[in-house]
Image: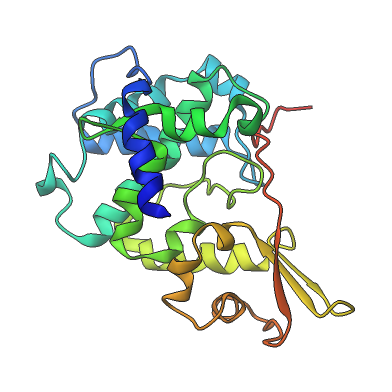
Amino acid sequence: MKRLVWIALALLAGCAQLVPAPQREPETDRAQAEAAWERVLARFVDERGRVAFAALERERADLDRFVSWVYATGPNNRPELFPARAEVLAYHLNAYNALAMYGVLAAGGPRSLSEYGLFRFFVLRRVAVGGEAMSLYRYENAVIRPLGEERVHFALNCMAVSCPRLPRTPFRAESLEVSLAGEARRFFAEPRNVEVDPARRAVRLSAILDFYPEDFLAKAPSLAAYANRHRASPLPADYRVEFIPYDWTVADAEAP
């Protein structure tokens, strides 16, 4: 089935549209680019992980600066800048989140990704990472997931309400393990991601665990057991697992 999906995506590649790079000279200084992303998160992301998209659209110089750097520079074409695995992972987490944020602006600020079109947003629209054009779908599934760190699913944010909470600080190589552990704990502590129904002997988990079950089951015998690795209060092992429907509404801090 997955092979058929990839064949279909390959056939549709000719229909894909490249989201234009920011209208600025590509940023060449890594420190300045990363500092720009840090300012974006601090200024435009609230405590609930929502983005003030209208304000960001009016003052988007820092986002454009970081995205122009991502478009031009990555581990694929500048490996000397990312000699350690943690540096590669941190780059991809920040780059994906910034590209998704940039994609929402490029799409005209839709109220909902599902209304805009999930296939259109994640597959047909392409961005660039280190000079290589790809969709967000391909970026996540062909570049990030093969790195073998399942906790990226608690750090990657496509700007929808049901996504993991977007941090207000960038991911950094030197603190990546602490950050990923913290994001996993926070994810499984949030009631919106985990619901326990003793009357029905059921546990409802975020649909993220249903999207990528093989990534989590590679680390634990069941999805509930995986969740328990990051929870203070364990989920009952004998409850059946259900999934919470995903809300594709854009997580806009300024939305009514």
Residue 9 is left or right of residue 77, and the answer is right
The relative height of residue 82 versus residue 231 in the rendered view (above or below) is above
Point 69% across, 82% down: residue: 233
Residue 71 visible in the displayed image: yes
* Count of marks, rendered view: 0
The relative height of residue 51 versus residue 214 in the rendered view (above or below) is above
Most extreme residue toward the right is 199
Q: Quadrant of residue 159?
A: top right
Point 51% across, 45% down: residue: 157
**Relative image position of residue 144 (x, y in whole percent):** 33, 52
Point 49% across, 60% down: residue: 212
Between 247 and 79, the residue placed more toward the observer is: 247
**Relative image position of residue 198 (x, y in whole percent):** 85, 80
Point 31% across, 49% down: residue: 142
Figure quadrant of the N terminus: bottom left
**Relative image position of residue 174 (x, y in whole percent):** 30, 61
Between 62 and 160, the residue placed more toward the observer is: 160
Figure quadrant of the C terminus: top right
Residue 200 is left or right of residue 209, and the answer is right
Between 234 and 31, the residue placed more toward the observer is: 234
Q: Quadrant of residue 74?
A: top left
Coloring applied to the structure: rainbow
Most extreme residue toward the left is 80
Q: Quadrant of residue 194?
A: bottom right
**Relative image position of residue 118 (x, y in whole percent):** 55, 34
Residue 95 visible in the displayed image: no
